[in-house]
Image: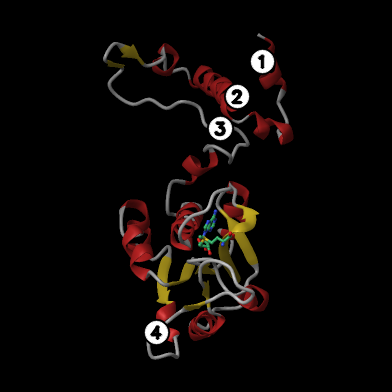
Amino acid sequence: MVFKVLTLFPEVILSATNYSILKRAQQKGLIKIEAINIRDFTMNKHKRTDDYPYGGGFGMVMSAQPIIDAYESIKPAKPHRVIYLTPQGKTYTQRYAEQLSKEKEIVIICGHYEGIDQRVIDMIVTDEISIGDYVLTGGEYAALVVIDSVSRLVKGVIEEKSAQEESFSTGLLEYPQYTRPAEFRGKKVPEILLCGDHEKIRKWRRYQSLLKTIKNRPDLLENFELTNEDREFLIK
Ligand code: SAM
């Protein structure tokens, strides 16, 4: 999987992805992250990448020319997705990440200031994505969210089992996790996790997943089909 990120701040992308799982994934050649500096494609003396908005108003808008030229310079493989990160986009979810992880190459455009000239969106963008209903200063932070969540779904990046059982993948939030020691400051790990009976542990985890989802994200249950076992748990 190749991520080609068009940004005014390549260092933000490259430095933040140079740790831990993403670093190892790059070393193993499972993912490749390229950051292309939009500023390198300006045609004016002062390397300005933004200008005043037509029609007036506050702030500056990123000009179309350097973004389009940067995009054309990377000759993306076809077919490919071109994502523009924007609070005006469709809300990003685990399902969206799963969809994107099937691509070979993704181009990501990071906006700044008041955003980018609409003509860039009209000309090359296939997906406008928002990572949530709030406004960031720049698309780089959102790009990192997309790169990280998609990378961990690429085969070999993390253990496949681990991704399958995680929050949202099952439709529920994940059950509580514990590690050693069995007692910490008087707080004990639930007895059942120490009993060695895998079926009992599976049932306990499923029940905990249901409880956590009901408590924190009841909206997820609207489109979730409860099993007979789930119903029995909830009646008890
Ligand atoms: N004027 C824009 C608006 O009201 O929709 C907001 C621009 S924001 C200050 C600057 C850049 O940050 C955007 O172009 C986008 O790339 C990024 N950004 C901000 N919030 C985001 C979000 N929730 N999801 C994805 N990208 C976001």
Image quadrant where one finds the C terminus: top right
Q: Mark 3, mark 4: which one is toward the viewer? A: 4
| Residue under label 4 | 47
Q: Quadrant of residue 164 in the image?
A: top right
Marks 3 and 2: CB-CB under 8 Å?
A: no
Residue 155 coordinates in the image, percent (x, y): 49, 55
Q: Are marks 1 and 2 in contact (CB under 8 Å)?
A: yes
Q: Is residue 110 above or below residue 158?
A: below
Between tags 2 and 4, which lies in front? Answer: 4
- How crowded pointer 1 is (Cα within 10 Å; few <14, some 14-19, many 20+) is rated as few
Amino acid under label 2? Leu
Q: Say which residue label 2 marks.
A: 210
- Mark 1 belongs to which amino acid? Leu
**Separation of residues labelled 3 and 4 (CA atoms):** 47 Å
Q: Residues within 10 Å of mark 4 (few under 14, many from 20)?
A: few
Left or right relative to 32: residue 98: right
From what the image shows, is residue 136 above or below residue 171?
Answer: below
**Mark before the other along the chain sequence, 2 or 4:** 4
Q: Secondary structure at mark 4?
A: loop
Instruction: List the residue tagged with mark 1.
Output: 234
Residue 13 - label = none
